[in-house]
Image (spheres, rainbow, N blue to C red):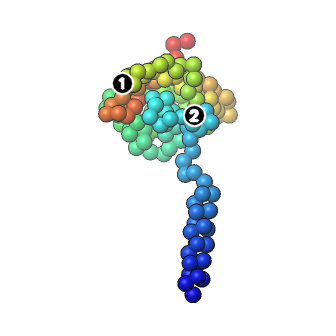
Amino acid sequence: MRALRALMMTLLVILTSLVMGCSKQESEGVGKYGMMDDGTPEYAAIQFFNHLYHDQDMEEVLRLSSPKMSRLVRNYHTNSNFQRHVMNLSYDKVELAVDSGNNNVRGQYSDEATVIIFFTGTFHGKKKEDLRTTRLKNINGQWKVHEIEVDKF
C-alpha cells in the first residue's frame, strides 16, 4: 500500500511539473523580439504609449507619468482626448517601436533620458506614420514620462 501511495505521489509531482513547465508566459515582452528590459527608459516610454493607445482607462498611463505629466493627463480625462489634443495623433490601430539608433550610453545614475517612439497605424483606413520624442525622468528608481515633443521635421 505504501509503494502504491509513493508511486501516486511521484506521478502527481511529475504531472504537476509538466503542466507548469508547459504553461504559456502570462505577459508579452516589449521591444524587438520581446526582450526589452523593464528597467529602461525605452520600456517605460513604450509602455506609456501602449497603455495610452490600447487601454480604456488612464490608470496605467498615470502610473508611468511624472507628476507634471500626470496633471496634464488628468486634464483630458480620457485616452482619446489626450491622443487627439496633446499628441495630435489619433489611430484606429497602431504599432509602436523604439528608435534603436537613439541608444545613447546612459550612466548608471542618470536621472533623465530621451527616447524616440515611432507610430505606425491606420486612421479611417488610411496609413499614418509619425514619431514623438519623449523625455523621461528617473523618479525613485522608476522611469516616468515627463514631456512629449512633436517631431521638428
Residue 72 visible, this angle? no
Q: Nearer the viewer, mark 2 or mark 1?
A: 1
x 52%, y 37%: residue = 50
Q: Position of residue 108 (x, y in %)?
A: 39, 25
Quarter location, residue 113: top left
Residue furthest front in the image? 3
> Could you tell me the amino acid type at mark 2?
Gly
Position of 12 relative to 93 (above/below): below
Distance (Cα) linking label 2 and label 1:
23 Å
Sequence order check: which comes first, mark 2 or mark 1? Answer: 2
Q: Position of residue 25 (x, y in %)?
A: 57, 51
x 62%, y 62%: residue = 18
Position of 75 relative to 21 (above/below): above
Q: Circle 1 — which element?
A: loop
Position of 153 relative to 123 (above/below): above
x 44%, y 45%: residue = 57
Which residue in the structure is indicated by mark 2? Answer: 31
Q: Would you say 146 lies left or right of 131 here?
A: left
> Could you tell me the amino acid type at mark 1?
Tyr
Between residues 7 and 60, which one lies in front from this camera angle? 7
Which residue in the structure is indicated by mark 1? Answer: 109
The quadrant the C terminus occupies is: top right
The quadrant the N terminus occupies is: bottom right
Q: Circle 2 — which element?
A: loop
Between residues 151 and 146, which one lies in front from this camera angle? 146
